[in-house]
Structures are given as C-alpha cells and as structure tokens.
Image (cartoon, rainbow, N blue to C red):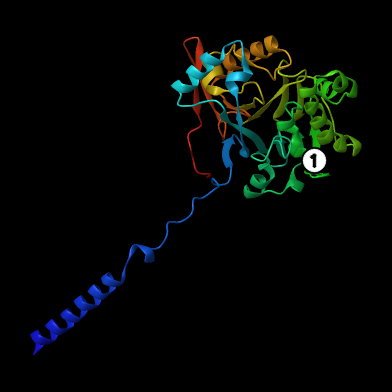
Amino acid sequence: MKAASLFRSGAFALAAACAVAASWSPATARAAAPLAKEQAPGVYRVMVGDFQVTALSDGTVALPVDQLLTRTTPAQVKKILARNYLQSPLETSVNGYLINTGSKLVLVDTGAAGLFGPTLGKLVTNLKAAGYQPEQVDEVYITHLHPDHVGGLMAGDKPAFPNATVRADQHDADFWLSQANMDKAPADAKGFFQGAMASLNPYIAAGKFKPFDGDTELLPGIRAQAARGHTAGHSLFVAESKGQKIVFWGDLMHVAAVQFENPSVTIQFDTDSKAAAAQRRKAYAEAARQGYLVAAAHLSFPGIGRLRAQGSGYLWLPVNYAAPQ
C-alpha cells in the first residue's frame, strides 16, 4: 500500500510538471528588462586630512578633440586615442568638487547647467545625492569663467547657491564680464562672454561676488594659486589638512591620453596657449615630485589621482576606490 501510494503521488507530480511544460511557449516567456539609461549617482568621496572632498559629476560631453587640440595633428591625436581604446569625439567628463572643511562647505566649479547641451547639468542633482542642499554651500570658487564652470551658478533665473559667496580671479572677471571684449570677439566666442555674464552678474548685483588677485589665502587650509594661460585669470585651488594636500586643476588639461604623454599639446580654448603649456608642465612636475592628489575638471570622473613621471611625459594613477569610513 505504501509503495503504491508513493507511486501514485509521484506519477501525479510528473503529470503536473508535464502539463506545465506543455503549456509553455516562447510567447509566454517573460520579456527581458529594458536597458537602463543612467549610471549610479556621480558622487565620490576622499579624505584629505580632516577635509572631506566629494567629486560631483555634471555629466559628460562629446568633444571632437582631434580638431580641438593644437601643437599636434588630428592624425597624431587619433593614433594616441586608438592606442588607449578611445576615439574622437571623446566623451569628456565635467567635474566639480565639494570640500567640507568641518566648518565650511566650499564648491570648486559648478558645471555647465544648460549652457553646454543636454548631457550636462547634473551637478546639483549629484550634490543632493551626496547628502547636501545648494543652500548649505558657503563659498563657490571658480577656476575660470568658461561656461562649463560657471553655468551651474544659476538655476533658471535664480542663483543656484543663494547663500554662497562666489570667488574668482579679478583678471578673469575683467575679461569675460566686459561688454567691450564681447563686442569685438568673434561670433563663435560671444557665447563664452554671455554665459559668464548671465551666470555671475546676479551674484554681483547681490553683493556676493568677491574677486581675488592671484595667489590668495581664501580660508584656513585653502588658497588660490595663479595659473594663467588657459584664461587671463585661470586659477588652481590648493587644499591642505594635517600634512595632506589636493590641488584642483580646473582646465589645466583636457585630454588625459594625449596631454599626459605630451604636456606641450594645447587646445583651441586656451587664451594664451604658450602660457597654458608652461603652467601644465610646471603643475605636472610638482605633482609628480610631491606625490599629492590632484583633481581636474575634465579627467574621467571622479578625476582624482596622482602623477608619476614616465619618460618625457607622465603616468596618471587614478585614486584607488575605497568606501567612505
């Protein structure tokens, strides 16, 4: 009896399984999930002494770098890119950086907002994903007044950081906020002036723009360092805490694969390409010699790492991934 009962229950289970199998068809299979369109939030944190630095992605923009880079040739650029499994147009990061000193929140560059097309403008969203609100930012330091660095100062027709003081070199302000300079600029360059004016003038009107001139102590542990060439007042920002150091390069460089190998290569966006190349060589050499962290607006996100001299150029060593402590 027991064996017969087991046989009958087993036979029933087998029949049920066969019935399910017979009813299945490709048409009834569950469809694959749609392709996801977003990366994870563009946020990465690193400690520099007691300072917490948070990289914030504004997005990426495809740049025809073989046509933009100078003191080289398009063919040479394409060759170097191919050797690095890249091609032109090159997806180029636009990064900003938030420094939490423990008493102040300082934002270095603001991204483009709507000034550089629909693939950018994510910095404030990522600031919020990092756990902060724009109203909490105390100071905004601008490396230079190009649209992909100042556009994020505005949220529509209102200041994006209403409680912040904005700081940039006076030489850049004098150049990019000048109506006379815009009037005599080529047609394809006028947008740079218009973007700077639209982004900064509301802060000026509110008494929240405080320019500096060259090397300047801005806060305890944070200073501006003149690096003029890319623009008339292009600045680096240096943050130091407990013997550790990070330097924010702004647009000291644009294309890692090309310009680390050959620091003399420049870009059409440079106001003074000879001076820009000299500043890059100086900054590379110091960073490699001292071994401190650097952060750059157009290095692949998060754009933080170190340099090591290699032959006549340099090797880029991205920061090792680590979870926040």
Name the outermost residue toward the bottom: 1
Q: Residue at x 8, y 84 (%)?
A: 3
Looking at the rendered structure, the number of numbered marks drawn on it comes to: 1
Q: Is residue 262 visible?
A: yes
Q: Looking at numbered disc 1 in the image, what kind of residue is underneath it?
A: Ala
Position of 62 with respect to 313 (left or right) is right
Quadrant of the drawing holding the N terminus: bottom left
Q: Residue at x 55, y 31 (%)?
A: 300
Residue 222 in percent (x, y) is at 71, 29
Q: Is residue 253 above or below residue 96?
A: above
Name the residue: 65% across, 21% down: 252
Along the viewing direction, whichever of 195 and 277 lies nearer the viewer: 195
Above or below: residue 3 compared with residue 67: below
Do we see residue 220 in this rendering? Answer: no
Q: Which residue is mark 1?
A: 164
Quarter holding residue 227: top right
Across and down, in percent, residue 197 comes to 84, 31
Q: Return the residue nearer the eye: 298 or 291.
A: 298
Whether residue 65 sits left or right of residue 176 in the image: it is left
Q: Residue at x 66, y 29 (%)?
A: 239
Quick one: SS at disc 1? loop
Q: Position of residue 281 (x, y in %)?
A: 60, 12
Closest to the observer: 53 or 16?
16
